[in-house]
Amino acid sequence: MIATSTSAISTACAHCGEPCKPSGDRRVQFCCTGCQAVYSLLNREGMSDYYCLNETPGVTIKPARAGKFDFLNEPETAAKLISFKDNTSTRVTFYLPQIHCSSCVWLLENLQKINTGIYSSRVNFMSKMVTVNFNHHVINLSEVASLLTSVGYEPHISLQNEKEEDKNNSVKTWWKLGLTGFCFANIMLISFPEYLGLDYASDPLLTNFFRFINLLLSIPVLLIGGREFYENAFNGFRQRQVNIDAPIALAISITFCRSVWEICTGASGGYLDSMSGIIFFMLIGRTLQQRTFSQLEFNRSYRSYFSVNITVLKNDKEKTKKINLLEKNDVLLLRHLEIVPVDCILSKGEGVIDNSFVTGESAPVNAGVGDIIYAGGKIAGGSIEAIAIQPFEQSSFTRLWENGAFAKEKEDPVSFVTIISRYFSLLLLLIATTVFIYWQVKDPANAWNAATAVLIVACPCTLLLSASFSYGFIMQLLAGKGIFFKNTAAIEKLAAVNKIVFDKTGTLTETEARVKYEGVPLSIWERNIFLSLLHQSIHPLCRAVVRATDFSPVALKDCREIQGKGMRVVVDGKLYKAGSAAFVQAPSGENDKSRIFLSVDGVIRGSYAVVSSLREGMGSMLSSISGYDPGLLSGDNRSSLSQMGQVFPSGALLLFNQSPQQKLDHIQHLQQQGNNVLMIGDGLNDAGALKQADIGISLVEDVFSFTPACDAVMNASLLQHLSVVLKAAKAARTLISALFIFSLLYNVAGIWYSATAQMAPMIAAILMPASSISVVLLSALGTRYIGWQMRLPKTDKNHLLT
Amino acid sequence: MTVMIILLSVSLSVGVFFLLAYRWSVKNGQFEDDQAPAYRIFFDDKKQQPK
């Protein structure tokens, strides 16, 4: 919320803790009516414990449209959420991103106190899911969803549920880690006696027993723990590629074979401890790296932007229809805040359409009967009826997605880990062969030993460890600052960026307009009258002014609105007028289109100007990244050219009136010139550009709001620190390169020992954990250092990191 | 020193027993949520019995 007037003293809302203006002499204060409603509901139901467990545990309430969850009553839709159903009871699972503290758990597990139709409910805190058992004769699914919404937990419903698979994967990962860890620890322990002087000659029985137990324990490590390395290596070979898993798989199998051979011949205990150790450490690294933010959706298509069902009027009866079944000439009923699903002609009612998300145009437009309204616009004001002129799949809006950029998943760029591992593998085989030939000539008895030892010791496990641990840590670190990456490849891509392109509306400027009053100061009484008058209008400018200003409403009689011109009212014999310059007979000046002029009895008082304001710190941010040649791609008109010209470095390319397709083409053009492009945008009009760019970052106020498909989601407040984020990504790359060199040193040392045939199990046993642990430690310290250098506060507004 | 063989066998079987217990707990979903149970302990148990 942006308001020009600053509040006197702010206190915290009793429900959510947001700062709010104290009003009246109430003991508890609220920031909005939504929070107040939840507070009184919970107190009425005797559930005030909610507020005792934590201070201001709630989440700021956003108003939800009545009937928003009606689509859940369709059996087909409901089936995707319902896990169990019998004659009386139903079990359903909702995803509630707002869950963040013990109060949440308490409230959500006491839902039966609020509605007796609910039997029980259970929260899974980590995945932020609640499972509700309810009697579907008493309360239906949409009512359960509304109930959750009414207590401040609006379910996020995406019908493409893959949670089941996630769960299986996490079970597998935990089990694999546990099993490998168990075997590794035992093998280590059992190997100790030999290091400490147990001799085969002195006690063959005991030594053999230890060795065979080790062999037995290493089999699950080899088969279960190491499985993904063989699989990845094999998949790489099938695509005619050598990935980093190939030399690792080779090293693991050779280590195992040689150990078996040494144990069977009684030569030594083999290298089973090293082998299980590296597998265990690498599994931990992989798990850390792959721990992404499954709660966030990065691959949303335009479909998830629309509601699933649309109300269609047929013979004056309201019916719901699936959005993809909409046909030409269907009559749609569109309510306040609904999204227009297809291009259609307005047939009844007056609409105010907010196209900002689709076209980037900041000012909403009025539409009358007969006007064409385009898919993707958001209805403000009252409900309207409209006739579809195209089926859903053919609307102007969905066509963008037919572009090639959406057809294929962006190929992961060849990471430098892959490149290094390719050369590394070749070099390794070369060294092994040379060593083999050398010893064959000099002392054939040593040849096999030395060659296999090279392959064992030179296993690039430390390379893999340094990459996976560092990326894992960096991803967590940046998430703490408010930028969430889809995968680790995205961080690498961010480090390689040399050109940045911004969207304007919603990205550089605030989504909410800023309101300025210019003219003769108004008395409080006059001000209240004017604002109450504007409050009656659904004109986008009036709404913007009213939203951004505080006032005490005055009851007005006989307000009259002259469509498209302005409002008038008579109070105490005085005529108050508010509207366009022509309407109040004001002299025309600059930017009249975004002004509301006010007059009392024909005397001009002043005007409210609605300006889309820049986010804080944009000027300094843009000058700090001037090395990246920032550019602007806006769907809005040129009216803000001068404003943008001031903040962008001189000579920057500022493009206006860009359609989504043009944006995509522009990015493609930049890429053809050899640039690595970073696109930062927020709306659907940027969807094509975000997808086409080497890396697309979606800017959001709230990470759970809709974002177009992208590689990373960034909190809007972090945008002013963009240069810091870019530096951190670069630092991460440097860190990983440094660790690579460091771990290569270990390899060189190891190869030297083994090539000269001095490799004793003892040295291998020391080298392995030393190298792994030092790499992990260094990557943790390095990441800490990067985080400290960023000097940005940690934010976790959305409780993603709890 | 042959007693070591017996000792090691016993200790390993105890270890395997706990490994199996771990497997059961993973499959049972105990690693899915390690926060909510901790909170639940502190809630006063004055729930109404569901009808």
Image: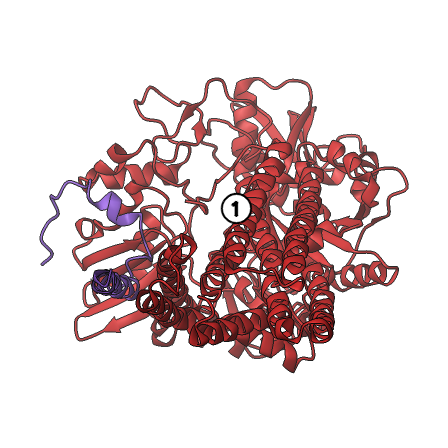
Q: Which chain is purple?
A: B
Front-most of A513 and A419? A419
- Count of marks placed on residues: 1
Q: For residue A402, which quarter of the picture?
A: bottom right
Image x and y of residue A596, in percent:
67, 35
Q: For residue A777, which quarter of the picture?
A: top right
Residue type at tag 1:
Asp
Which chain letter matches label 1?
A: A
Find chain A in the image and tell me its colour. Answer: red
Q: For residue A720, which quarter of the picture?
A: top right
Relative to residue A796, is residue A614 drawn left or right?
right
Instruction: Work out which quarter of the rendered image holds the C terminus of chain A and state it.
Output: top left
Residue placed at 45% from the left, 63% from the top? A276
Instruction: Work out which quarter of the rendered image holds the N terminus of chain A and state it.
Output: top right
Front-most of A463 and A707? A463
Front-most of A315 and A403? A403
Q: Is residue A244 above or below residue A14?
A: below
Image x and y of residue A368, in percent:
63, 58
Asked whether residue A156 appears in the rendered view, the answer is yes
Read off the residue under disc 1: A702
Mark 1: give few (<14), some (14-19) or many (20+) Cα within 10 Å: some
Residue placed at 16% from the left, 55% from the top? A116
Asked whether residue A321 appears in the rendered view, the answer is no
Task: State the SS at label 1.
Answer: loop
